[in-house]
Image (cartoon, rainbow, N blue to C red):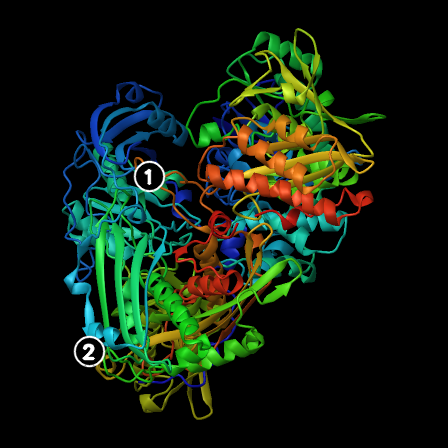
Amino acid sequence: MSVASSNNNVADPAMIDFYLNGKRRQCADIPPDCSMLELLRGPLGHTGTKEGCASGDCGACTVAIGEPTADGSLNYHTVNACITPAHQAQGAHLVTVEGLSRGDALHPAQAAMVECHASQCGFCTPGIVMSLFVLHETQRTRPAPFTQQRLESALGGNLCRCTGYRPIRDAALQMADQPDTHPTWADDPSLPGAVASLCRDVMGRTEGASPGHYTIPRSLEALRELKRERPEARLVAGATDLWLETTQQLKPLDDLIDVSRVEELNRVEAHPEGWWVGAAVTYSRLAPLLDAEFPAFGRLLHRFASMQIRNRGTLGGNVANASPIGDCPPVLLALDARLLLDGPDGERDMPIDAFFLDYKQTALKANEFIRGIFLPRSEARQLKVWKLSKRREDDISAVLAAFAWRLEDGVMRDVRLAFGGMAAIPLRVPAAEAALEGQKPDEAAFAEAKRALRRELSPMSDVRGSAEYRLVAASNLLERLRLSLDMIPTDNGMEVMLDAYAH
Amino acid sequence: MNEMTDPTVIGQRTPRVDGEYKLTGRAGYTGELHVEDMLYGYPVPATIAHGVLTSLDVDAARGMPGVVDILHHRRVPKLYRSPNSMGHGDQVSEIRLPFEDERIHYHGQYVALVVAETFDQARAAAHAVVARYRQEDDARPSLLLTDAEGDLLEEEGDSRGDPDAAFERAAVTLDETYCIEAESHLQMEMHATLAEWRGKRLIVHESTQGVVYQRNALARTFDLPQEDVEVISHYIGSGFGNKLFMWPHAIATAAAAQLVGRPVKTVLPRQQDMLTAGNRPASRQRIRLGAERDGTLTSIRHDSTTETSTVDRYVDSCGGATPSAYACDNVAISQRILPVNHGTPCPMRAPGEVSGVYALEAAIDELAIALAMDPVELRLHNYAQHDPQSGLPWSSKQLDKCLRSAADRFGWSQRDPGIGAMRDGDEIIGYGMASATWSAGRQPCEARVELRADGSVFAACGTQDIGTGTYTIVAQTAAELTGVPVERVDVKLGESSLPAGPLSGGSMTTATTLPAVAAAVRDAVDALKEIVTKPEGAFAGVDPDALQVRDGGLASEDKHISFAELLAMHDVASVNGKGQAAPGGEQEEYSFRSFGAHFVEVRWDPGISRLRVSRVVSSIDVGRAINPLAARNQVEGAIVMGIGMGILEKLEYDPRDARLMNSNASDYRVAVHADMPEVVDVELLDYPDFRFNEFGARGIGEIGLTGVGPAIANAVHHATGKRFRTLPITVDKLVEALG
């Protein structure tokens, strides 16, 4: 690995060309499985950013990535550098804790942290400062009140073992009272344009790369071609799960195709019957659609990992990963979502409940990828999503239930009961659905549905919950559904109190 | 003693002197350090918990790019076990040396250490080392999964009166067993060592709570004169006890550096940190109480068992606080340890006592219910006005004020004691409380201070700042006693070559270090006075004792000259002072202990069995807080850690083979931002304890954690009617018990 800061424009696919704290950096010979954190702390010697877990759980490695927007500015979001591929810095502006102050003058995020004694041992501090920096930037461009929910969302992915969090929250609230000191690099009005231009420029460089490299195609056609040439190459989007293979299991990832910049995979398209969501659309970008059209799904995102993960993770990744405890697949099952699979041999459409075959086994062929996920529109459908985890925020589900139905003349129709954490795959339980289909939502029908759950499901015991806990909890969630149907007027069926159910 | 009755810097909300370094990423933790020619170490952990290493194939790994060497049980320099003595300051965390033999005692035990040119190369090669094992099937996964009694430790027992007979006679009795699952420190910064040999000298940078102890232990391990070893630790990403004493990774790293003749740095990955570098052991405690109908305690027996490993005998003494807790004539405590197949446990914040206080304070709550008494009243009824175990008076005890003040602020009088009687919408509200306590100790300490011609003050001590604010309070102390502003005080800590300072442990650092720093300041001032009162001096003819220290200078009547001017006038670069301080005769006259009270509100939604801690109101008395801002936050942080202990944290060992299943920050759950209660109201009483030291300060790092667990468990009982006697109280237990 080597580092240069010249502007020499070589088409080296292993070269990462980006801006770091306002300065152009070119890093050559970076291996495909190098993380952004390893790049920063190693070749770049920027050790302010810390490793606390190397699994995206603690947030000590939080950095900000600025990406060019249509209006010519840079939009910053937080990521966990420990599980973000170094090559995803390509053409972006990376901001780290070293890049915030202006000479001796601290950025408001830093000054407020000092003022509030919000740093004890200081090891989580650089990550927290970066989360506050992005909160401050967001506030600068889109001011809104710092509600409890917003602060939990902004800081939920940053563990601190010393302070008990109160001073950190105080610092967030106090940032606005500090002198609005800008980092030195923010003086340069040409920076956003330079980043945008670099971004356009570097993107094409790696498309022709051979196996053993980190390849970033820009178009669907290029992606198809790459999958034809390198069917065994692993696909990476947000890397929020894939990267654990290298940091936790020490496995090399030496042949990677990054789908995150494929234009066709980054669209959200509205159709009369529903929405096509590109497989590389991140949760953060998907959130406005879900909040507007699928509020129960939208609320799930508040309890779905941390902000840093939501900024990188994708719906396509969550589906393709096929984890039995992924949070989105049960919701997609309940919504009758469809998938568009694509590859060098053409595209095909499939209902999502045909996709999951066995533990981590899917209907994807070796050279295929998920291109999009279709979310059908239905005015009459009602949806509830309940996540059970041991911790309210930033935790993996023990059980996730997604229930959809519509009421027609007082009876339930199109009942979909889907679960995560109850089997080797996320799945619907047709026998339980049948018990409710065409029935009034009364005790007898639900009793039969609950019996069906017990009959059909045999979950495993693990650190997240015992088999018995999972069965009791899944059954109780059905009871919860019955009680809520009793209480909630049918015209208000979209109301979901997810945060009341997440623990 | 010079009682500091009216300080101007001490006791003020002083921002941390290291804050800016930490906020800008410039604070150099061990993992950041780089020296020329440095190699990277990456340990290879055993994948079984109990058995024998039957073969180790390192050939493939040895041939990988960048690999320089691989240490294992057949390739390791000569090492010696440390005598492991607290008295001689060479205690270690695990007495077994790395790579001693083929025996595997716990999951994660190092079977090899790869040394390579880069971190990536070391990690890749560690993955390529092939170890084969013969697993034995009688692994012991946890104290809480066995009925085995463990070994009784006679020296840990204590008693007064005849608790057995008193129990038999008591009108009301209680006999219950309380358990706590093993916990991980999950300190944010993993353990790290950078070892470098310069000729026969060994220089080690380590994230440690005790540079002096580790220096001594390394000297014993490598058979070196103590003077030839230096341990440095300028910034520490907290420790909570698991960085007190040296662990095998530091020995392995120094051994590797010796073997290859180049510096080696090892940063433990989180998984290995959790597997090999300490945990709070699980505990099982039987409490037997006897009382009169009016609530008078007549018998307390507290019998504890805690885990240790099969390679060391760590004792987490649970009963330590019990004999002094209540005015009861008949008390006995006992302690057992049971070896299990875990990495060796170690102290974790308020070690032993936090577990013991949980058991005792939960039992007192149960007794209050059996007696139909208010739990606060029961505690006040049995209030110990003097230390019932030593018979000595307390130096200063304000527990009654803590109980009453916290109860008032919490609104305890509004409590309806009926089970589940307090509701708010879907939620049932539970109130619970418990007392907090931690012993107040101090150690001998030395310090050095310089008054410098540039107007600054330099203070140095061989203790370290683990994040609690020691840099800042040492600066405050020097500022207080010289009148030089805090920002002109340079503090040097964290080097074993500095005057010997204490471990950062036991909440003793403040009370131990500051008196030595104060003595050193006075010594330096005396040296200056001697110079300036000489015949040719600026204060010639003035009696040195009549010279006052004021505003960063010396003053006599209306003449004031700053230290800087004085030193310049006399052509002296600096004057030096040495200070020493140690506990003295006061230890024979008084008992020293801190007390406090926690009141906790929980909210339980029976529909989904969700439990939250929504409000904590605490009053803590630690004498004087040197820095109230830092001190209060020690308690707030401890409370949130206590929420982890109460409802979240548990190391999960596989019952079949004792492997640790949740050695990561995802599956081992600590409280996150959203778990912070809506209200955390911490009051620090201000009763300076001048019998303890001139600053009136006892320690504050640990007491805040004691009592939080039982207050939560007691509140859960109030809400649910179910007495959970094992922590943490997780949602699956609530569902199982309550549907």
| Marks 1 and 2 share the same chain | yes
Above or below, B653 against B506 in this view is: above
Q: Amino acid at mark 2?
A: Gly
Q: Secondary structure at mark 2?
A: loop
On residue B371, the disc is none
Q: Which residue is mark 2?
A: B161
From the viewer's side, name the closer residue of B102 and B574.
B102
From the viewer's side, name the closer residue of A216 and B564.
A216
Question: From this viewpoint, is residue B567 visible?
Answer: yes
Above or below, A152 against B532 in this view is: above
Q: Identify the subunit bearing mark 1.
A: B
> Could you tell me residue B290's position as x and y percent?
30, 74
> Is residue B570 rendered to the left or right of residue A370?
left
Q: Secondary structure at mark 1?
A: loop
Pick whichever of labels 1 and 2 is earlier in the sequence: 2
Q: Amino acid at mark 1?
A: Pro
> Could you tell me residue B259's position as x and y percent?
21, 33
Q: Residue furthest bottom?
A: B557
Q: CA distance from mark 1 to mark 2?
A: 41 Å
Above or below, B717 against B26 in this view is: below
> Could you tell me residue B529's position as x and y percent?
33, 82
Q: Which residue is located at x 43 percent, y 56 percent? A: B645
> Could you tell me residue A429's position as x and y percent?
61, 28
Q: Which residue is located at x 59 percent, y 43 percent? A: A476
Crowd class of label 2 (few under 14; some 14 to 19; many from 20; radius 10 Å): some
From the viewer's side, name the closer residue of A113 and B244.
B244
Question: From this viewpoint, is residue B576 visible?
Answer: no
Q: Quadrant of the N terminus of chain B?
A: bottom left
Q: Residue furthest front?
A: A444
Q: Identify the subunit bearing mark 2.
A: B
Q: Which residue is mark 1?
A: B655
Crowd class of label 1 (few under 14; some 14 to 19; many from 20; radius 10 Å): few
